[in-house]
Image (tube, helix red, strand yellow):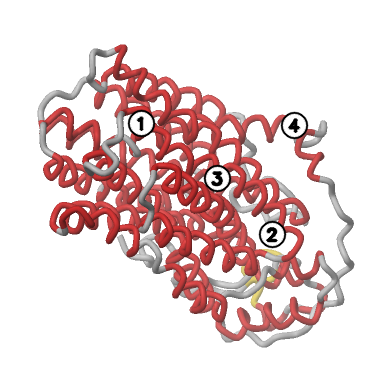
């Protein structure tokens, strides 16, 4: 499905939101528009595409790292130097999510204080360095310490990137663009599966170390990203930096061939305490989005971080397991593209709840799968529906809070989700024991978690077509 088929990049008239649909820009008094309204009226242009790709590549590196650990931990467990048992494997998986929980909360807070662009770049450097450190680890303690630091960088970057892209996206296409940003996660996970399939088994005892060194590439990309990412206009205005905010808006207007007419200086926005997340105004929204994040994270990370190991146990071959996981990972892409197509047609809430319901069904069917054909069929359905839901969830979260707390609120929701990501991999060995070593109990539990996430999503506000709140 191309970007044109998704409604991205198609030529369309630029409207004046202050005057009504269909009125051309040439007849509008642009000085009556705020900078955010000037951004919202633009069609998708090369500046948006550049931002999407630059942020998306960083997102893909994140996914590659998270995906790699599920393959790496299987290889480390088989390394005679480590010889990890099931509990030690689960800790290598979960320690990164502890870092991600802390990083998500801290990164969102810092992004509202010092800027989205600054935090995005810093986090990529952190997890790039830590990947290199993990590659040269020779003790379990060193592995865990490096993985924790990797988690700090990963956790901070994801909500910041989605917030930045959301704040520059035109209102009518914001959900679709954010879902497409999330689709880069599938690219990264597929790269991880390819590295797991081709690199780790074919490079001897150092296979998993070479895989982690590949994961250090974000160090180089961080330098490039720093030069090509704009800072959020809403953040700059909130800080009172109207000159840089104006320059950023003009850059996007020029990309659409729109004549720039300066807005009136924006008033510096009053600060909002993060405690407002649980105030009477936002409590219901916060509970709904936190519950959605928690149960989606629980199911996703419980299922996919253990999948290579579970399939290796079921079919008795590490190489075959990595190949099956690669095929299941590729199914993420059509899931994202379908979600991107539906999110502006059906709306956020309907699309998210539908994808979560399908995920619940797929997880249950996967729990009962015995043959290779069943594993691939239901695994690919689970992969497509689950990751499509992730895309919509990242689109929804920044929309439901105002600018001054948007990144912090997104980070807080992600941090709650990471708590589930910590717990789920630790519980999988217990689920396996209950089921006599097979995956049935684990995936039935994940199916129930998807149902709970679906119910929570039904209580989220519908923001399709609405401008972001300042």
Q: Residue at x 64, y 71 (%)?
A: 15
Q: Are marks 3 and 1 in contact (CB under 8 Å)?
A: no
Q: What residue is pinned by disc 4?
A: 283
- Which label's residue is closer to the chain start, 2 or 3? 3
- Which label's residue is closer to the chain start, 3 or 1? 3
| Left or right, residue 367 beside residue 180 | left
Q: Secondary structure at mark 3?
A: helix
Q: Quadrant of the C terminus?
A: bottom right
Counting other residues with Cα less than 10 Å from the Cα at mark 3, is it few (<14), some (14-19), or many (20 or more)?
Answer: many
Q: Nearer the viewer, mark 1 or mark 2?
A: 2
Q: Secondary structure at mark 2?
A: helix
Q: Nearer the viewer, mark 2 or mark 3?
A: 3
Residue 324: give x, y in percent of width and height: 17, 42
Q: What residue is pinned by disc 3?
A: 99
Q: CA distance from mark 2 to mark 4?
A: 22 Å
- Which label's residue is closer to the chain start, 3 or 4? 3
Counting other residues with Cα less than 10 Å from the Cα at mark 1, is it few (<14), some (14-19), or many (20 or more)?
Answer: many
């Amino acid at each position: 499905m191309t970007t044109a088929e998704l409604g991205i990049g198609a030529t369309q008239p630029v409207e004046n939101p202050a005057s009504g649909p269909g009125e051309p820009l040439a007849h509008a008094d642009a000085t009556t528009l705020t900078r955010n309204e000037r951004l919202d009226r633009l069609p998708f242009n090369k500046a948006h595409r550049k931002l999407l790709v630059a942020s998306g590549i960083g997102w893909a590196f994140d996914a590659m790292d998270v995906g790699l650990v599920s393959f790496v931990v299987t290889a480390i467990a088989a390394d005679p130097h480590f010889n990890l048992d099931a509990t030690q494997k689960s800790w290598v998986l979960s320690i990164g999510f502890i870092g991600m929980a802390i990083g998500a909360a801290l990164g969102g807070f810092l992004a509202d204080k010092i800027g989205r662009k600054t935090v995005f770049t810093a986090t990529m450097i952190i997890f790039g360095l830590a990947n290199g450190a993990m590659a040269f680890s020779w003790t379990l303690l060193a592995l865990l310490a490096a993985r924790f630091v990797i988690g700090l960088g990963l956790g901070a970057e994801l909500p910041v990137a989605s917030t930045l892209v959301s704040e520059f996206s035109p209102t009518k296409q914001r959900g679709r663009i954010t879902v497409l940003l999330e689709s880069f996660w599938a690219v990264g996970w597929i790269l991880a599966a390819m590295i797991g399939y081709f690199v780790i088994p074919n490079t001897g005892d150092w296979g998993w170390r070479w895989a982690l060194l590949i994961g250090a590439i974000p160090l180089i990309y961080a330098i490039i990203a720093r030069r090509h990412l704009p800072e959020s206009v809403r953040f700059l205005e909130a800080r009172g930096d109207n000159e840089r905010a104006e320059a950023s808006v003009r850059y996007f207007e020029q990309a659409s061939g729109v004549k720039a007419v300066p807005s009136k200086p924006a008033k510096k926005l009053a600060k909002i305490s993060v405690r407002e997340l649980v105030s009477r105004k936002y409590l219901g929204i916060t509970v709904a989005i936190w519950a959605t994040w928690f149960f989606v994270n629980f199911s996703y990370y419980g299922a996919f971080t253990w999948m290579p190991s579970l399939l290796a146990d079921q079919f008795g071959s590490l190489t075959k397991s990595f190949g099956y996981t690669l095929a299941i990972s590729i199914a993420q892409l059509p899931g994202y593209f379908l979600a991107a197509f539906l999110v502006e047609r059906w709306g956020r809430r309907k699309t998210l709840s539908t994808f979560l319901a399908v995920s619940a069904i797929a997880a249950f069917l996967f729990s009962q799968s015995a043959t290779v054909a069943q594993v691939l069929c239901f695994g690919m359905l689970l992969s497509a529906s689950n990751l499509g839901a992730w895309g919509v969830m990242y689109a929804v979260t920044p929309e439901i809070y105002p600018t001054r707390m948007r990144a912090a609120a997104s980070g807080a929701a992600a941090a709650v989700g990471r708590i589930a990501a910590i717990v789920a991999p630790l519980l999988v060995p217990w689920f396996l024991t209950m089921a006599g070593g097979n995956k049935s109990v684990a995936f039935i539990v994940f199916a129930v978690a998807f149902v709970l996430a679906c119910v929570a999503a039904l209580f989220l506000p519908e923001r399709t077509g609405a401008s972001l709140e300042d």
